[in-house]
Amino acid sequence: MNAADTAWIMTATALVLFMTLPGLALFYGGLVRSRNVLSVFMHCYAIACLMSVLWFLVGYSIAFGPSDSGLWGGLSKAGLNGITADSLSGTLPEILFFAFQMTFAIITPALIVGAYVERINFGFMLLFSGLWMLLCYAPVVHWVWGGGILADGGIFGEVGVKDFAGGIVVHETAGLAALILAVFLGPRKNNHTPPHNPGFVMIGAAMLWVGWFGFNGGSQLAADGGAAMAITVTHISAATASLTWALWERIKFGKASLVGIVTGTIAGLASITPASGFVGPWAALLIGAVAGILCQEAVLVIRNRFKIDDTLDVFAVHGVGGIFGTIMIAALGAGTWTAQLGSLVIVGVFTSVVTLVLIVVCRAILPIRVDLETETNGLDLSVHGERAYDMSS
């Protein structure tokens, strides 16, 4: 065990949890109507709790257990079987590696929340999210990070896919699942209302930006120069994408908005995530510059051309950003085109099929959408019996 590595990854674990609670909750909560902000908070909080328990019970074992087939890790580490405070994973206590990866298992299904806010049934959301993490996310983790079929020595030969912190594992999977769920749910009855609290959105985005240093820098699993470089390129990409998003918005619509510039931040962060351990500052500048425009155009295409109510643009920002960053690894010579593109296709097909099956199964058990009266009145009071704001005071 290396004390410096351990101390850094403990810090990174806290930072990644901070991304979901309260970062993502505030970012998403500010974007919805005031009558639904508590439901968004509830979704993020409940997902964090449920994924933690499921990751402990079987998720970690599926993702990082030993496997001869390369398809999944089995159940030998279920319930942290055989893992003690003295067990090591590289230079880290394995229990810390478990906790660090648990925070990734929390935020990935939490990202999907943005696609279905203001209209999804709470019970369906919990059932789908739990099954999706175990049956979609955890196997993909094994394929890419757990020594599975897409890693070095897998189906692409000696050099497998390069995905440093989750362009494929986190952002492609969550983005595609979000898009498919949005199609099945259909649009909101009133989907033209502006964000009720752009200040929340900015605060949440700022928390995500800070937390992303743990997300990408922690993925080095060491306190060294590689972690420092990952943090630096993460920051440069985020800052650059924020500026290009705002500039493109100003050119196209005449004004640069607060919600726009912080959405650009998230686009830059998602895009640099897979490449953050393989590229330098100039490459990060390029990735961020393109991401701010590319993801903004993806938002407009999905909303206006395809008429899909992916409410908070999960696929356009996270899905497109993660896919773009994964491709840029090959374009910049840090990975092979075959492994990068092949892995995107394999994981994309797998995620789409599993998501579709789970939606059909879960919908047969619980309603997927709230009734019209509940949607009109807002989920906060109708579902959770609470109001975010006391309008009488």
Image (cartoon, rainbow, N blue to C red):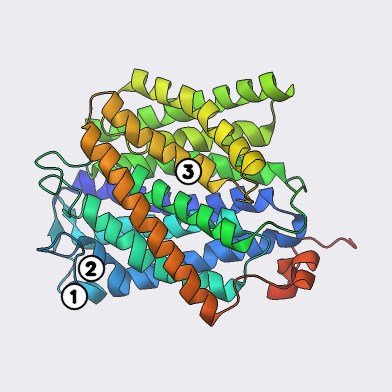
Q: Residue at x 41, y 25 (%)?
A: 287
Q: Amino acid at mark 3?
A: His
Q: Amino acid at mark 1?
A: Asn
Q: Residue at x 64, y 70 (%)?
A: 369
In this rendering, position of residue 65 left or right of residue 388: left
- What crowding class fits label 3: few (fewer than 14 Cα within 10 Å), some (14-19), or many (20 or more)? many
In this rendering, position of residue 152 left or right of residue 242: left
Mark 2 or mark 3: whose residue is earlier in sequence: 2
- In this view of the protein, which residue sits in the foreground, 241 or 139? 139
Circle nearer the viewer, 2 or 1: 2
Q: Residue at x 90, y 63 (%)?
A: 392
Q: Which residue is mark 2?
A: 61
Tell me where residue 249 sits by quadrant: top right
Q: Does residue 199 show up?
A: yes
Mark 1 or mark 3: whose residue is earlier in sequence: 1
Q: Are marks 1 and 3 in contact (CB under 8 Å)?
A: no
Helix, strand or loop at mark 3: helix
Mark drawn on residue 81: 1
Image coords of residue 378 (percent x, y): 76, 65
Q: Residue at x 87, y 60 (%)?
A: 391
Mark drawn on residue 318: 3
Circle nearer the viewer, 1 or 3: 3
Q: CA distance from mark 2 to mark 3?
A: 26 Å
Circle nearer the viewer, 2 or 3: 3
**Residue pushed farthest bottom?**
365
